[in-house]
Amino acid sequence: MINAALFGLGRWGSVLLNSIQGADVAKSDKIEITTGIARSLENYQDLASKTGIELSDDYTDVLADPAIHAVLLATPPFAHAEQIMAAAKAGKHVFVEKPFTLDVAEAKRAVQACQEAGVILAVGFNRRYYPSITALTQMIEEGRIGEVQHIEAHFCGITAMSIPEDSWRGERANNPAGGMVARGIHCLDSMIHLCGDVESVSVDSDRRISPADIDDVTTMLLRFKSGVTGYLATLMSTGEYWRLQVFGSKGWIELRSPTELLVSDVKGNTERVTYPDIDWQRTELENFADAITGERPFYIKPEQALHGVEVLEAISASINSGARVDID
């Protein structure tokens, strides 16, 4: 059993916690969160009593505890690099929520710190564990749609219309490219997973109706080193929408939900395929535990997460320059 500390007990931290030891689920036999870390402990007494965790407001003290094997970071991305490096120095394995960081140099230092300490570094792109993405990946590898030529993705919602005034999510400096940090980064990760490294990006991004000072309409064209082209859009002031579609020489596959695909051949004959649902958040955390024990590697490789930060930096550079930006 891996004993973990969770830093960040807000909305998403609670999702992580409840996925493996919530009141309505069977407790995981692979990983347990024993300690929760937060600044205002009085806000989380009820959560602690329901889930059996201890509370602490001192990350340094928690890292010094030999009974803690790993840390889960559900903190803002601008804090990730420092927190990761502190955990690595203490010999703790690290699971960090997306985005990994917002700065390539910081990301590289964090990766290096974990490598030198010999600890697992896992970046939380939970949508990689969708049954539909698993099936889509297998179909592409088996040649179901032939040679991949183009990929498109959307991840949109109404987030920008309800950001609290004092939240970092409403700060332009901490949300480059509008919805990329909150939403679009998931699409980018899936595209990198399916098509490899990105070679260049060209981006348009605007603030249309968002009350917060962030862009709420961001669109981009991507070219992958493999020659595949791509289109990605993320809007923060519209209805909820998620789509991933891959076009090949023998047809296309469209992801509609965690459990559904549409598959078409070149003649337009379309098949709807569904898959049993799973708790993909729990699956991700148990994959992290398995990586620590050596049972199986973590699904998202650190170099893929690092490349995602490189692409995110290039996206910001393209917005600022108005030009296509190459990625070294």
Image (tube, rainbow, N blue to C red):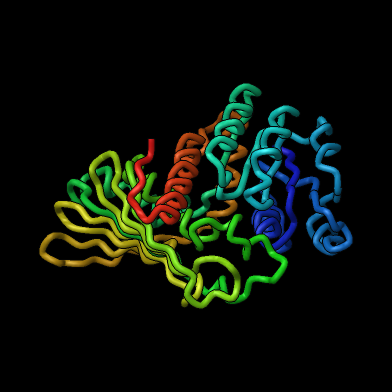
Residue that appears at 63% across and 42% down: 95
Question: Who is closer to the viewer here, 118 or 24?
Answer: 118
Image position, residue 34 (x, y; %): 79, 45
Residue 192, x across and y down, in percent: 38, 45
User: Residue 263, how many percent across, how many down?
Assistant: 25, 61
Which quadrant of the rendered structure holds the N terminus? top right
The relative height of residue 56 versus residue 60 in the rendered view (above or below) is below
Q: Which residue is depicted at the point 23% across and 56% down?
A: 247
**Where is the C terminus found, in terms of image quarters?**
top left
Q: Please tell me which residue is depicted at 60% across the width and 31% down the height of the picture.
A: 109
Residue 10: which quarter of the image?
bottom right
To which quarter of the image does residue 111 belong? top right
Task: Name the residue at the right extreme.
Answer: 42
Residue 64 seen? yes
| Above or below: residue 65 compared with residue 127 | above
Along the viewing direction, whichever of 275 and 258 lies nearer the viewer: 258
On the question of residue 1 being in view, the answer is: no
